[in-house]
Image (cartoon, rainbow, N blue to C red):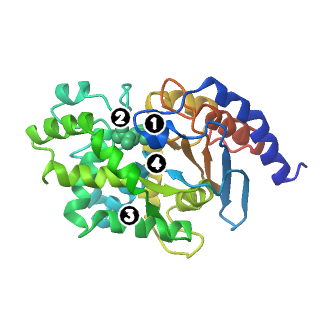
Amino acid sequence: MQRLDDLFDDVAATARPHAKRGRVADYIPALAGADPDRFGLAMAGLDGQENATGDADVGFPIQSLSKLFALVLAMQRLGSERGVSEEIWQRVGREPSGDPFNSLVQLEHERGIPRNPMINAGALVIADLLLEHCSDPIESLLELLGELAGEAVAIDESVAAAEEATSQRNRAMGHLMAAFGNLNHPLDAVLDVYNRQCAITMTARQLARASRFLADDGIDPASGREILSGPLARRVMAVMLTCGTYDAAGDFAFSVGLPCKSGVAGGILAVAPDHSGICVWSPPLDAAGNSVAGRVALHELAERLGLSIF
Ligand code: GLU
């Protein structure tokens, strides 16, 4: 059998050329200036083994990947499954939106209830919940990510400032939800949490480690600590699978077969249940906003290691 390190290099060699088909996000300078040739892939196994190739130790803004961990933090703070259903799922749904991540259209029709926590409007509701349940939501998020990654993580302040300067659309969503009574805190405070969570910088290796607890039924294998109960971890993965890759979740389920979450800086997280946490990073995106080469890499890796959940 091929050695895992060789297999990783092979997967990278197959995926990398596909980056040419994509375009890096350009709504803020920090993303517009990203090197399109960067490519990192990392896998953190439940047995502690790590495999990585390329730029797996280079940091990038986690952007929408933060939505996953903000949801996890909200679930932790709300505790029981009952608390979670009452507080989270009354205010945000769990259906794919079929619309771009920053669309306002459904919010008006659906009376300020976002389709799911993986799109911007849903993430704003989660940020609002965090303001209620954490004295400092960003500090708590950085703590959680640092614990899971096994290393301290930090915010790129220039990215945070640029997010703030370009947040008109998110602000519009916030106003609409507030008008429907689905935000309890001042919009500026909610947006501040959201903009700063998007600006957290992590590497593919750290993110692979950070998502590994989902593969282990909610237990972080590094510490043995329960991050979420098994049922809640499974629900997070269900939301990732159906809503985690913008308007291409069906296609990701079809071609990768793993719960995934992607971000506009070109990172994609994937969870292989009972096996590992995986993260790939390559900045050029396809029309749906997912990393082009990242998607090819996850397809290849899942195929070659037989990881699909189907
Ligand atoms: N900061 C981005 C936004 O809110 C994040 C989007 C993403 O990664 O999908 O527009």
Per the image, the residue denoted by label 3 is: 141
At label 2, counting other C-alpha atoms closer than 10 Å, the crowd grade (few under 14, some 14-19, many 20 or more) is: some
Q: Secondary structure at mark 3?
A: helix
Mark 3 or mark 4: name the one nearer the start of the chain: 4
Q: Is residue 109 visible?
A: yes
Indicate which disc residue 95 carries.
2
Of pointers 2 and 3, the one earlier in the residue sequence? 2
Numbered disc 4: secondary structure: helix
The CB of the residue at mark 4 lies under 8 Å from ligand 1: yes
Decide: marks 2, 1 in contact (CB < 8 A)?
yes
If you read the primary sequence from the N terminus, does the residue marked by circle 3 or circle 1 appear first?
A: 3
Mark with earlier residue (2, 1): 2
Residue type marked 3: Leu
Mark linked to residue 135: none
Q: Which mark is residue 242?
A: 1
The numbered disc on residue 65 is 4
Q: Is residue 119 visible?
A: no
| CB contact under 8 Å: marks 2 and 3 | no
Residue in the picture at 36% in, 25% down: 99
Near mark 3 (Cα within 10 A), the count class, few <14, some 14-19 or many ≥20, is: many
